[in-house]
Amino acid sequence: MLAKKCLFVVIFTLLSVSLAIAQDPPAVHPITGEDLVLQVFRGSPEIDGDLSDWNLSAMIPAALEVEEQIFTGAENWDNPEDCSGEFYLLWDDENIYIAVVVKDDRISMTKTGGDIWNADAIELFFSNPVANADHTWGQSIHYQYGFNANNQRWNWCNMDGPGGIDPDYLTIASSQTPDGYICEAAIDHTKMLSLDFSAGNTIGFHAVIDDTEAVDREIQITWTGREAHDQSLGYGHIILSDAAVAPGPSSSPSPANGAMIEETWANLSWRAGEFAASHDVYLGDNFDDVNDGVEGTFVGNQAATFIVVGFPGFPYPDGLVPGTTYYWRIDEVNAPPDETVYKGKVWSFSIPPKTAYNPDPPDGTEFLEPGATFSWTPGYGAKLHTIYMGTSYDEVNDAVGGLPQGTLTYSPGQLELEKVYYWRVDEFDAVETHKGDIWTFTTPGAVGDPQPANGAVDVQMTTALSWTAADNAASHELYFGTDKDAIKNATTASPEYIGPRALGSESYDPGKLAMNGTYHWRVDEVYPTETIKGLVWSFTTADFILVDDFESYNDIDPPDPNSNRIFDKWIDGYGTTTNGALVGNDMPPYAEQSIVHGGIQSMIYFYDNANKTSEATLTLVYPRDWTEEGVTKLLLWFRGASVNAADSMFIALNGNAVVPHSDPAVTQMSGWHKWVIDLTEFAGVDLTNVDTITIGIGTKGSPAADGGTGTMYFDDIRLYLL
């Protein structure tokens, strides 16, 4: 959208001109009328999506949390759980740091590049501390940056030159939380030539959150409550303090957290907390031990902000061990008299293994093109590499005497189709040879396409397995179990052997699986002259029992036997005069595919309660036993809208066991909301034999003459232990 992109007309700022300008009062809060001013302390946090080194309790954020701060989309906003956030800032001589803690009941980031504003995103504006009513879409009177929880970033408006770029001087790291997400960013403020980031100076600042639960932006909430670019009454102000944030934990580890270092020793250093007098150092090769400070991990208390490891006279005197990940923690100890200890976060670094690692293509790749080139990351100290490749696991595993090479790529020539290949890279470090792991891949035509997909999670306990047969296989041998190594090594004499499967029978029902369990399986392809051993596939079952996620419904009309339309399973009031519910869309797609909570479909539900109550009922095939696996809670997600007629909502089991929602105007709750019901609330129902579940709008059995209309959405109905 041109209006968002600022048209990028360049306004050059002569660097010889002083940056000192007049200052106007800051914008005020739309409810309290208080000045929007933040004191920004010095600090240099690590940008990793973890805010434990920010000491947030010592800082005051820019809070975006009330309806009066919504510039657009108030009709879609129900409460702060739907969309709100806090912006924390720090600065140093190079960067302005921003930590944004967002509450968002459904995260949706469907846009990229300069369009990220049109979904869930953060926007930041920096300007001179003046009111400016002359902003047009060709004048750059501020800097505008944006980023999201997918770590995408953009610079639209720029006071020094063209915007419309992906700014490589903006670093972003994000993480999701139970009620939203965190974005942590650093912007090199030396790139903002028109602003003076010096101690004591004031900078104009505006914070913005964009939010959607559909396709395009539905809500924009801003610090001032005005449109994001509206500087006519000024932005808020940030004042750059020369003081550090209140005492807190250590930060800025070197080597960086998660780094791989190419030596068997290291010089570990960190930035001390502002008032730390000394440092408690913990080090070990187990995260939990270091986090808990168990015996053997405490190295000692010291004044220096560095420690050498891996040399005689220091921790790990025999050297760090290749192939090992080490964890370390620095607790900051304040000077007397308080001597407060600030526990640090646990950081890590790794020493590369002596064997080759990070194969390309990755282990388990399917349908690799026959002319591919292979590569890997060399083992620690490796000088030469010997590659073995073939279609027999045993031959590749046992091979010796290959020709070594100095390069890190390998081209085997044209590979055979419809094969499972194995390959291995041995590393020679001028002293000894280190035998590599066995990696696998298949070529086009081989057995593949496992369902559930390899590595799948949240698989239902009643799932069936299926796969695509190799092009010319005569039959299959199937193996299934919970021990990966056992599946890998199983033969037809092993307990994991399920049996032969005829061509055309590429499926298997293992029966009800355990909740939250990991399973492994393998399909060998049988040919007239040989049997080709398949890859080992894995999946993990869910920690819940699915009632309905609305993903299985399709747009196929009867009499096609594959028809599975949503309104043929959820029976509504179509054709009646007493039931005002209508489920699904009139035309395909019948299930809702734009406004969803999880997956790609939800159930759209229209209600008309004039002298009626609205009900939609699903007859259950599975699950029928709602005590299975010890489940105790029913959970479902729903979404209403402020324009809906206010009404109540209920869930009924077996027609008559009814639980109403506590809010009599629940239909007006915009955004996705979670409703958790204790199964004991369904009075009089046999939970071991639940036949139907009904979603109702209104009061069951008590239609109202003045009932109104509206549209609801439902998704992800599940049973949990909780």
Image (cartoon, helix red, strand yellow):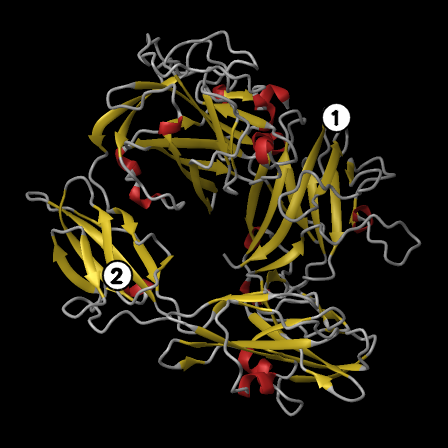
User: Disc 2 marks which amino acid?
Assistant: Ala
- Residue at 40% x, 71% y: name it: 353
The label number, if any, that marks residue 351 in the structure image: none
**Residue that mark 2 sits on:** 266
Vertical position of residue 368 compared to residue 428: above or below: above
Of callouts 1 and 2, the N-terminal one:
2
The quadrant where residue 57 appears: top left
Q: Secondary structure at mark 2?
A: strand
**Residue that mark 1 sits on:** 705
Q: Nearer the viewer, residue 516 or 148?
A: 148
Q: Secondary structure at mark 1?
A: loop
Q: Is residue 83 left or right of residue 300?
A: right
Q: Nearer the viewer, residue 382 or 335?
A: 382
Q: Is residue 241 left or right of residue 656?
A: left
- Residue at 76% x, 71% y: name it: 445
Label 1 crowd bin: few (<14), some (14–19), many (20+), radius 10 Å: few
Furthest residue to the left?
Answer: 337
- Marks 2 and 1: in contact by CB < 8 Å? no
User: Disc 1 marks which amino acid?
Assistant: Ala
Confirm whether residue 291 shows in the render. no
- Residue at 72% x, 24% y: name it: 706
Confirm whether residue 185 shows in the render. yes
Q: Position of residue 259 (x, y in %)?
A: 37, 56
Q: Position of residue 189 (x, y in %)?
A: 36, 29
Q: Nearer the viewer, residue 337 or 132?
A: 132
C-alpha separation, residue under disc 1 versus residue under disc 2: 77 Å
Q: Position of residue 521 (x, y in %)?
A: 63, 75
Vertical position of residue 325 compared to residue 21: above or below: below
Q: Is residue 219 left or right of residue 242?
A: right
Q: Nearer the viewer, residue 308 or 416?
A: 416
